[in-house]
Image: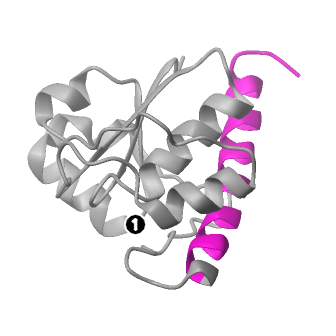
Amino acid sequence: MFNKILVVCVGNVCRSPTAERLLKRFHPSLTVASAGLGALVGKGADPAAASVASAHDLSLENHCARQISARLCREYDLILTMEKRHITALCDIAPEMRGKVMLFGHWDSEREIPDPYRKSRDAFEAVYTLLERSARQWAQALNAEQGKP
């Protein structure tokens, strides 16, 4: 069973905090957190990410970026990344994690979710749409895994 999920991107200020909150929205019984491979440690969510999320009634308030570590990885049942290269990087950090690291876009044809950092609001909107779709798909898959409709 996957009860504790860690969502990973690069800076932990755009994609992973949004994905974390979306997964919590669609599957409230999960423990979900996020971290970054090159985290902007201590920073809140990117203002553009927070603004787009807010426009969709999703709050990124009180998010605080943190750095991924092997120790942190071991605390979670499933680790979801935005890009395939993130999987490689995580497996370099903690090789024993290989079997529990997957793409956040796994159920969406193994789609990678591009980094909108320092891009236009339209880029953030497009990424939000991808994150929302993938979060819904993960919630459905995890419900099925737990025998829930």
The three-letter code of the residue at mark 1 reads Glu
Where residue 148 sits: x, y (%)? 82, 17
Task: Name the residue rendered at 10%, 46% in the picture.
Answer: 93
Q: Is residue 105 visible?
A: no
Kindly identify which residue carries mark 1. Answer: 83
- The picture quadrant where one finds residue 29 is top right
Question: Quick check: 9 left or right of 17?
Answer: left
State the residue in front, 135 or 145: 135
Location of the C terminus (image quadrant) = top right
The location of residue 2, given as percent across then percent down, is: 52, 22
Q: Which residues are magenta?
A: 123-149
- Residue 138 inside the magenta-drawn segment: yes
At x 13%, y 37%, the residue is: 69
Q: Disc 1 on helix, strand or loop?
A: loop
**Which residue occupies the extreme right position in the image?**
149
Q: Give how far across and how far down residue 118 sits, in percent.
A: 38, 80
Image height check: is 103 above or below 146? Answer: below
Which residue is at the front of the view, 22 or 98? 22
* Classed neighbour count for the residue bearing mark 1: other residues with Cα under 10 Å, few (<14), some (14–19), many (≥20): many
Q: Is residue 5 above or below residue 131?
A: above
Q: Is residue 149 visible?
A: yes
- 140 on left or right of 119: right
Q: Residue at x 21, y 50 (%)?
A: 90
Q: Classify 127 as above or below 121.
A: above
